[in-house]
Image: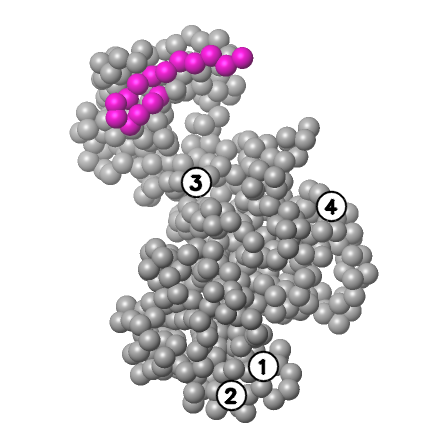
């Protein structure tokens, strides 16, 4: 899994799936938005592969997390950087789709920047363990992992996937 | 500040519990506040000027002294964090005694509030409230007597960092009534902690508190010398309401010697910025040409104040939440 060639293959597969989905839905001139940190790395590559002209948007969902009252403030390094999303076809990118809570937070934040025409979700890895009904429109690959197993994207250069086991 | 003061403000993990004074806080914590504020700074420019961070929390603005700017920016900061805000303007005369302050506190606690922002005419009022409040409550000092005004000092540091960059290369001149200024005291602590190259105070001797040199400050009674080559010029308001006795002949006389005009500002570095915590006394400590001039960042300080207050509020409430979770 840590072989960089595999990552390239996953990103290419995700790019193809996204392009097909966007074409099928007639979503032109998309605005690509990555979720910090891993999602931004992946989104940068996808933006090149799909030749998207609009500048990359980034989301730091720390202010939208649902566990603030449990764990407190996260140190914020990079704030969100997003222009108006009004009437745009937003393509939201994250590295791993697990519980679905990050995407819930990201969607809430996007809608505080305006009213997009649509949101498409693309993830490099979709894994088991959803806690809320969120699903991706395009994926690099699916992984069936036990609840004590975690998959993490390391980067930015080179990108690699790491699966760890926590008891 | 004694070590007990720090135990009161910061928990064992180094997280901010209350924000009462800059004195004794670590540099890293101050930088963390500035960085967090930086990430909140863009919220006011979005379609929806709110983040849901403090949804369901109740913040009380407990003001025993009149204030417009500080109270409204605290209120706006709380609302941008989605908290509910209660504004209480208590009169100073009926509540200066510890007993009745405590009674006010107990009453508000019974309303299940999460944070008090306290402005009080007596030094130490915010400490008193923080040390007597229920464990789940955070206290932010919105100015106590002539002791401290930490959020004002941090928004000034935010302005300096944004406009002038690294503190290590900066000469900062604080001009005016330092003796009565809680803002100046907090600014000096912040500037020294953040490693400013040189911190100067420029004022007539009657308005300089004793022992200032021990804080690492150079004191000038000549405005031209005090402003020479300064990168940042911070003007303070002449606080007539706090002055007792004949410290100054008149406000007019003060302007003659210490009022900052464009001509006098020429002594400072050409790229110097001019700051003032407000409200301005035009024609007393600052000339209108300077206040409205290109080097003035006075109005931007107000917007930075919202971001700094959002940062401090979310950090303090967040650390309480985390600490409660760890105990359970």
Q: Which residue is mark 1?
A: B240
- Look at the image and give the residue range highlighted in magenta: A153-167
- Badge 3, how many Cα within 10 Å: few under 14, some, many 20+? some
Q: Which chain contains the residue that carries disc 1?
A: B
- Badge 1, how many Cα within 10 Å: few under 14, some, many 20+? few
**Relative to the observer, which residue lies in front, A162 or B202?**
B202
In this rendering, the answer to whether A39 lies above or below B38 is: above
Query: CA–CA distance between discs 2 and 1?
Result: 9 Å
Q: Are marks 2 and 1 in contact (CB under 8 Å)?
A: yes
Q: Are marks 3 and 1 on the same chain?
A: no
Q: Which quadrant does the N terminus of chain A fall into?
A: top left
Q: Secondary structure at mark 4?
A: loop
The disc label shown at residue B228, or none: none
User: Mark 1 or mark 4, which has the lower sequence index?
Assistant: 4
Q: Which residue is mark 3?
A: A76
Q: For residue B25, say whether it is visible.
A: yes
Q: Secondary structure at mark 3?
A: loop
């Amino acid at each position: 899994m840590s072989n960089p060639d595999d990552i390239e293959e996953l990103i290419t597969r995700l790019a193809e799936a996204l392009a097909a989905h966007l074409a099928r839905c007639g979503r032109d001139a998309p605005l690509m938005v990555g979720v910090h940190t891993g999602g931004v790395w992946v989104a940068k590559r996808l933006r090149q592969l799909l030749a998207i002209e609009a500048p990359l948007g980034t989301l730091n969902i720390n202010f939208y997390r649902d566990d603030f009252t449990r764990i407190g403030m996260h140190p914020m390094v990079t704030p969100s950087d997003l222009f108006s999303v009004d009437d745009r076809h937003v393509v939201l990118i994250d590295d791993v789709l697990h519980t679905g809570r990050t995407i819930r937070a990201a969607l809430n934040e996007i809608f505080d920047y305006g009213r997009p025409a649509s949101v498409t979700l693309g993830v490099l890895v979709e894994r088991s363990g959803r806690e809320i009904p969120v699903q991706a429109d395009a994926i690099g690959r699916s992984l069936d992992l036990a609840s004590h197993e975690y998959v993490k994207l390391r980067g930015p250069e080179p990108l690699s996937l790491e699966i760890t086991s926590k008891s | 500040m004694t070590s007990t003061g720090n135990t009161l403000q910061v928990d064992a993990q180094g997280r901010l519990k209350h924000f009462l004074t800059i004195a004794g806080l670590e540099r890293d914590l101050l930088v963390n506040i500035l960085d967090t504020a930086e990430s909140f700074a863009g919220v006011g420019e979005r379609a929806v000027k709110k983040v849901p961070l403090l949804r369901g929390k109740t913040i009380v603005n407990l003001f025993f002294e009149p204030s417009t700017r500080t109270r409204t920016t605290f209120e706006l900061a709380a609302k941008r964090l989605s908290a509910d805000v209660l504004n209480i303007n208590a009169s100073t005369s009926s509540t200066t005694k510890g007993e009745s302050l405590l009674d006010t506190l107990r009453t508000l606690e019974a309303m299940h509030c999460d944070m008090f922002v306290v402005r009080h005419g007596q030094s130490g009022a915010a400490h008193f409230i923080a040390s007597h409040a229920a464990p789940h409550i955070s206290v932010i000092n919105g100015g106590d007597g002539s002791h401290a005004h930490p959020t004002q000092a941090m928004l000034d540091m935010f302005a300096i960092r944004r406009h002038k960059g690294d503190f290590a290369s900066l000469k900062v001149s604080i001009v005016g009534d330092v003796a009565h200024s809680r803002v100046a005291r907090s600014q000096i602590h912040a500037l020294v902690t953040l490693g400013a190259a040189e911190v100067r105070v420029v004022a007539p001797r009657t308005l300089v508190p004793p022992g200032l040199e021990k804080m690492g400050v150079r004191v000038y009674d000549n405005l031209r010398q005090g402003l020479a080559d300064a990168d940042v010029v911070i003007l303070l308001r002449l606080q007539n309401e706090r002055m007792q006795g004949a410290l100054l002949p008149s406000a007019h006389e003060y302007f003659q010697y210490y009022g900052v005009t464009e001509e006098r500002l020429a002594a400072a570095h050409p790229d110097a910025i001019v700051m003032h915590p407000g409200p301005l006394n035009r024609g007393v400590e600052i000339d209108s040409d300077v206040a409205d001039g290109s080097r003035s960042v006075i109005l931007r300080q107000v917007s930075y104040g919202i971001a700094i207050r959002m940062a401090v509020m979310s950090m303090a409430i967040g650390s309480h939440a985390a600490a409660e979770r760890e105990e359970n």
